[in-house]
Amino acid sequence: ATEQTLAEVHLVEGPKLEGDIFSPMVDKVHGDVRIGDEILVFRAGELLGSARSLASKWEYFGSPGMVAKTKHRL
């Protein structure tokens, strides 16, 4: 059996995460991300919470729009 792990989205340094995730906030993405996937959200190596992806991985860079809807914040 293969172990399923959630994709990780790492955000650039900035203000406290209070809303949803927009592509200019994204520094890097680890793993494959598809629309509807649950993803883990990190900043500076610290887990901030999880989000539901609204975009495919390639859309996380270069488009100005919202790419994920924040679900849980730690």
Image (cartoon, rainbow, N blue to C red):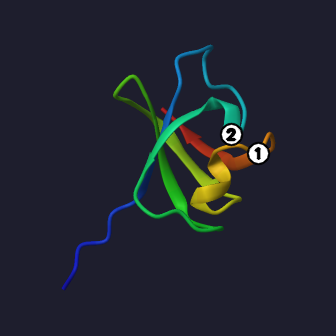
* Res 15 quadrant in image: top right
* Res 35 quadrant in image: bottom right
Residue 33 locus on image (x, y percent)? 53, 62
Residue 55 locus on image (x, y percent)? 69, 60
Residue 31 locus on image (x, y percent)? 40, 59
* Res 70 quadrant in image: top right
What residue would you read off at disc 2? 23
Residue drawn at 62 percent across, 25 percent down: 17
Residue 3 locus on image (x, y percent)? 23, 73
Residue drawn at 63 percent across, 30 percent down: 25
Name of the residue lying farthest toward the top: 15
Secondary element at tag 1:
loop
The foreground one among 6 and 65 is 65
Residue drawn at 76 percent across, 45 percent down: 63
Few, some or many residues within 10 Å of mark 1 (<14, 14–19, 20+): few
Q: Decide which of tag 2 and tag 1 comes sooner along the chain.
A: 2
Q: Distance between the residues labelled 2 and 1?
A: 6 Å
Compared to 39, does 20 lie above or below? above
Horizontal side of 31 relative to 3 (left or right) equals: right
Residue drawn at 18 percent across, 85 percent down: 1
Whether pointer 2 and pointer 1 mark residues with C-beta atoms closer than 8 Å, the reply is yes
What residue would you read off at disc 1? 63
Horizontal side of 51 relative to 55 (left or right) equals: left
The foreground one among 5 and 62 is 62
**Res. 59 visible in picture:** yes
Secondary element at tag 2:
helix
